[in-house]
Image: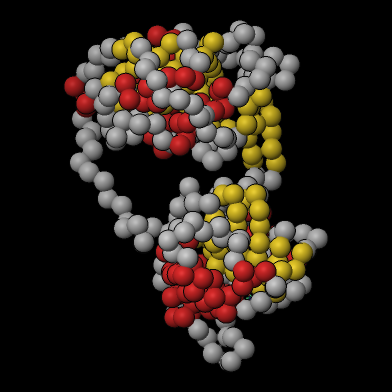
Amino acid sequence: METLLLLAHTEADGSLAMAALEALGAATALKPVPGGSTLIVGLIGDSVQPAANQIAACGASRFLGVAGKDFASPRYATDAAAAQALVKAAAATVVLAPGTSRFARCLAGVAQRVGGRADTHVTAMSAPDGQLSVSRWYYRQRMESVLRREQRPWFILIDAGSQSMWQGAVGTAAVEIVSVALADSAKRTTVTGFRAPSADAQTIRPEAELLFVAGAGWTKKQADGQVRSAEAEKLILEFLKRSRASLGSSKSLVDQCGEGQAVLSFLSHLNQIGQTGSTPRHPKGLSTCCHGEEPHTVGWRFINERRAISLDPNCGWARGKAEVLYVADAFKVLAKVNELLSAASNSHYDPYVVPALAGQREKTG
Ligand SMILES: Cc1cc2nc3c(=O)[nH]c(=O)nc-3n(C[C@H](O)[C@H](O)[C@H](O)COP(=O)(O)OP(=O)(O)OC[C@H]3O[C@@H](n4cnc5c(N)ncnc54)[C@H](O)[C@@H]3O)c2cc1C
């Protein structure tokens, strides 16, 4: 029998973010529950009651909280002290937590303090024979391992985007507040504010429905013999603004940016998808002006539905890397799509329901 502690921190408005609800979703979906386990929720934040109410119906047997101004902002010393107190109060054998930067920073240290072990980047949990197992990927998402541990408490940090969020009615939870005595030395670090790019400058949007990938073709000579980077920039930015898609890139394109060529100014290596880039999670992906080579498409592993626009009918996307390849000029397609998006700007946009593309579809193997 395990005692599962779902550990979460609240957001600035007191609520729980998507990643925390996903971790809770993973905990409640665990079937069969290892040896009749119990679920306890542990919350950290300025005020934890709104978050507890948000998940009051999750079936937890207890709601514990460490609350107060000292626990409002991410800080190693106070987060670690709070997590340690909650693990102790719950007598947890398994600690499930969202793999946020806040928890990734401190939970391995907490595991060390309480004589446990920690696994990060977990993407699945199961208990087929009543014993808890977790899955995670290795070697740039090429190999998946399923592992078990004897050591307790076992800290499991779950990757955001890998689970279904817990959903349920808001209620009223009775929170048991756990007090944590903090030395002054634990409060030396202070958060003085947040700096974030403006919404339009922020092109990486992990929660977007669509990943839009730009390839090097956007900056290559086109049929008219001209390089049309400025036009490409305008088309892509307008599409991102209207669709709220997340922007990815091929390596060739971001490398050109680093080499100082006149290319797309809003791209950096952070946008790179692939073997030496990132492996984001989005329900849908649309690749444009990209050849779809293996080192790039390996980064699409967690994109559920893939489509591509390329002039080359023999590109990698046509060889089983995408469900649909549009053999077309991406400049023309995106101009038309932007026009349609502009016309439909007040209605909900499904990135694949664009009539202009319907006649150009080519199903790939
Ligand atoms: C060790 C190693 C690691 C690597 N890691 C990565 C990685 O992490 N990520 C990554 O992306 N790559 C990676 N690469 C590089 C990868 O192999 C490819 O070279 C790269 O992905 C090619 O980028 P691309 O498809 O954008 O450019 P290109 O190969 O130049 O393809 C451009 C495409 O655009 C099309 N095109 C041009 N104009 C238009 C138009 N108007 N409309 C439609 N289509 C058009 C062309 O037909 C062409 O297919 C790696 C390579 C190595 C060796």
Residue 310 vertical placement versus 221 (above, below): above
Residue drawn where x is 31% and y is 52% of the image:
196
Residue drawn where x is 27% and y is 24% of the image:
47
Q: Position of residue 260 (x, y in %)?
A: 43, 75
As drawn, is 1 to the left or to the right of 265? right
Residue drawn where x is 60% and y is 57% of the image:
285
Q: Position of residue 61 (x, y in %)?
A: 47, 10
Which quadrant would residue 212 be assigned to in this image?
A: bottom right
Q: Position of residue 313 (x, y in %)?
A: 75, 74
Ligand 1 quarter of the rendering: bottom right
Residue 285 vertical placement versus 39 (above, below): below
Residue 293 vertical placement versus 147 (above, below): below
As drawn, is 176 to the left or to the right of 244? left
**In the picture, which quadrant includes the C terminus?**
bottom right
* Foreground pick, 364 / 297: 364
Residue 37 vertical placement versus 272 (above, below): above
Evaluate whether residue 157 shows in this view: no
Q: Position of residue 12 (x, y in %)?
A: 29, 35
